[in-house]
Image: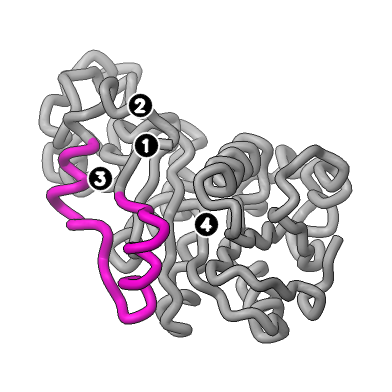
Amino acid sequence: MESPAELKTTSTCHVVALPYPGRGHINPMMNLCRLLCSKKPDILITFVVTEEWYGFIGSDSKPANVRFVTIPNVIPSELVRANDFVGFLEAVSTKMEAPFEQFLDRLQLPVTAILTDTYMGWVVRVGNRRNIPVGSLWTMSASVLSVFHHFDLLVKNQHFPADLSERGDEIVDYIPGLPSTTLANLPTFFHGKGSQSLHLALEPVSLLPKSQYLLFTSVNELESRVIDVFKAEFDFPRKSMNLVQYERQYHLPVATV
């Protein structure tokens, strides 16, 4: 593992990647980093994980220009997080920002862009404060993101809150980009115990307009309608002074990966 002071390179593009601390999020982020390295061999990617997660994946194979850096274990252990999932989500939302900013403060190499998980919405605020472009990686289907992003339509159509035992077969046909479905087929965040942590999912999604890029782990041909909705609504990529040169060289638009 390299310390921040050792992250020196002749590369003109330095990307900091911060995945959500869970296997189903870390793996897609690492796959994206592998893809970037294959397209641009001179890129340097600093992959930030907790000390615990470095113990899990530190020995995994990775491109030579992907380097691990850790922040302290300020969140509950992966081994027990299921005991209090809401508490784990709250810790990720509130405890990781300070050590991540301290890491950025120690970096000697300028950061060209930050890649993060959409669920790590606070990273968008960090990037905006520091004038660093942020790419948001959504690790589920684009269709699920459309449901979260258009949550207000569920409320408007009186489909939230709703008792699925009585109304689960009711049709939901107004989510942009999605075909008709039933209320019972919506993500579990919208009913049962999942609703206890719904606010922790909606808050980071609400920050998407403040990011510069949105990327999906999907296939455009399968979800072209909903991806087109996001392209039209958000007009990504959003340029900043730092992003213009980066976009011309490395191209990270709304895309599938």
Badge 1 density bin: few <14, some 14–19, many ≥20, Cα 10 Å:
some
Q: Is residue 140 above or below residue 71?
A: above
**Label 1 is placed on what type of residue?**
Thr
Q: Which residue is mark 2?
A: 219
The picture quadrant where one finds residue 103 is bottom right
The mark lying in front, picked from 3 and 2, is 2
Residue 16 located left or right of residue 197: right
Q: Is residue 243 left or right of residue 11?
A: left
Which secondary structure is most common in the magenta stretch? helix
Q: What is the secondary structure assignment of the residue under circle 4?
A: strand
Q: Position of residue 133 (x, y in %)?
A: 41, 70
Mark 2 Cα-neighbour bin, 10 Å: few <14, some 14–19, many ≥20: some
Mark 4 belongs to which amino acid?
Thr
Q: Which residues are magenta?
A: 227-253
Q: Which residue is mark 3?
A: 151
Q: Position of residue 43 (x, y in %)?
A: 58, 59
Location of residue 234 with respect to 126 vertically, above or below: above
Mark 1 falls on what kind of element?
Answer: strand
* x and y percentages locating residue 238 in the rendered image: 26, 66
Mark 3–mark 2 contact, CB under 8 Å? no
Q: Horizontal and vertical percent for residue 104?
A: 64, 79
Q: Are marks 1 and 3 in contact (CB under 8 Å)?
A: no
Q: Is residue 175 magenta?
A: no
Element at badge 3? helix
Alpha carbons under labels 1 and 4: distance apart: 15 Å
Where does label 1 land, which residue?
256
Dots 1 and 4: beta carbons under 8 Å? no
Closest to the camera, between mark 1 and mark 3, is: 1
Residue 252 forms part of the magenta stretch? yes
